[in-house]
Amino acid sequence: MTDTLTRSASRTTTTQETEIADPGLIGDLQTAALVTTDGSIDWFCTPRFDSGSVFGALLDDERGGRFRIRPVGDDWTSKQMYLPDTAILVTRFFTPGGMGQVVDFMPPVGTAATDRHRIVRVLQCVRGAVTFDLDVRPRFDYGRGRHHVELGADGAVFAADGQRLTVHVAREPDDERLAEVRVGDADLHARIPLRAGQLRGVVIETGEAGPPRAMRAAEIRRLLDDTIAYWRTWLGGSTYTGRWREEVQRSAITLKLMTYAPSGGIVAAPTAGLPEQVGGERNWDYRYTWVRDASFSVHALLRLGLGEEAAALGGWLGARIRERMSDGGDPLGIMYRVDGSSDLHEEVLPHWRGYRGSAPVRIGNGAAGQLQLDIYGEALDSTVAGIRAGLVLPHQGWYAVAHVLDWLADHWDQPEEGIWETRGGRQAFTYGRVMSWVAFDRGLRLATERGLPAPQARWSRERDRIYRQVFEQGFSAERHAFVQHYGTRVLDSSLLRMPTVGFIDGRDPQWLSTLSAMDDELVTDSLVYRYDPEASPDGLRGSEGTFSLCTFSYVEALTRAGRLDDARTAFEKMLTYANHVGLFSEEIALTGEQIGNFPQAFTHLALIDAAVSLDAALDGRGLH
């Protein structure tokens, strides 16, 4: 295994735009920031993941705003790493005259929602002498807000339409005043020469009404030590000791970084607008909590022994069901804001050019009103898994579950938009039917195991109807495979989960022939496409890369089919596509470049599931 201390990216100064997977991620459990290998914070929204951006150069280098610290000139290279078992990012810069580094982190802020968030940036010269350039160029509200700046002896304050960004300087009272500071076009620029052993720091803070203040080195050190201790203590709760410990633990930390602590909801990604095809229109806002992602995350976290986070997500899911019990509509939306609200109005930011010209840049998500029947199976599956792991099912919780199943009994047999949120019209998607079967199956098991009141005859009847329908209409005798939706020949890799959820045995002949068909049509050098958009138009122009979630699902399907050598090879190949600090986006382009929103929760939770299942199979233990 590659040691965390040496897993780093090299970067030389060029004019090429930043790659999607160039940054590392830091966060405080309510929002997050992306820090590139040239020391630039190119994405930061505040006070929440789904709030307006302050730094958004990731989507528009000129109008997005950034906070960059790097050596002067062009003659330098950089490497980036995480401190082991933490979310603390270190970017090291190598110049002809010396070596320096910037340590970036966000102190966790707890479970009470707050507007106050801090990004700590520590500048150090390790050897020789290094002069750093510092540029703070905020662009509030996705670059739509005008701001002004007030410079003081101990920092600066940027203000725009009621928002404030305060810059505090970290130094000792008797420290030499090293920085050359100037303000231009309402932005802050500084040059800081350091010699070996010297340290300075900058803390940017939102939601702070007071003036900037000089922070002592001891205070910065305490914040750093407390943040290290937080992450290592939290990660110490993981029970995973398998072959891929570093990759699994980095995935667990990444999922934690994308969790909104006040509600327990987890965002699909901390970014918006990163393209599934560079230059194309498949650019979506993923800064919301999908029921599907939350459900899968419960499973992944339970498999690592992280019950507290699984319980919080379970509580979030339960609250979403209960709040709709009286309105007579769908029991669940497919996605929500991190606080549980459902206003996700989609709009375009026409003034932003988009990543490498990939327009339009969208905020909000118009898919929020779609019908996706698979979410009910995923929600019930994670609920039962949590209860079996010791989580509490309150009295009202069971009635919420029964409400969902009673609604589903009346509504499962209809066309829907499906898991991939297609905008080309509703279909009878096979995966949605399979997961509806899962919902009834898990509800029946729970009612039987716990002796809970339920219309079991009705639920059993609907479960069995779905089972027969999927085998009669969802399996193509011509393709010898389960297909994307009824009446088509198109394959769909969402169905790789059929053995995982227990709908069919992974060694069943009809499943093995399906897997073989996917090998021929959807798999390329172990990477897996979702489906073929040309064969099954989804209402959008352009193409996309292979889908990383599906690749890890393929590993699990191979494992359950008994093809362990193929599964391990596919898994190890997929790990090579991670970025320098172990992060994955949504998709992989044909060039091997990561594309889509970054980092992606779906990908990291699927990595965890695949690793745990493959470990168990290689060790001769049973799969769950």
Image (spheres, rainbow, N blue to C red):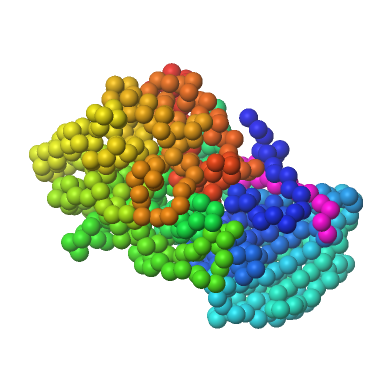
Rendered position, 612 above or below 232: above
The answer, for residue 417, to whether it is visible in the render is: yes
For residue 53, what is the image quadrant?
bottom right
* Place of residue 219 in the rendered image (x, y in percent of width and height, measured from the top left): 71, 61
Left or right: 205 in relation to 361: right
The residue furthest left is 457
For residue 503, what is the image quadrant?
top left
Left or right: 542 in relation to 80: left
Q: Which residues are magenta?
A: 73-87
Rendered position, 270 above or below 231: below
Residue 75 located within the stretch drawn in magenta: yes
Residue 333 located within the stretch drawn in magenta: no
The answer, for residue 233, to whether it is visible in the render is: no
* Place of residue 529 in the rendered image (x, y in percent of width and height, measured from the top left): 44, 39
* Place of residue 609 in the rendered image (x, y in percent of width and height, measured from the top left): 44, 35
Please state, as top left, top right, bottom left or bottom right, where the N terminus lies in the image: top right
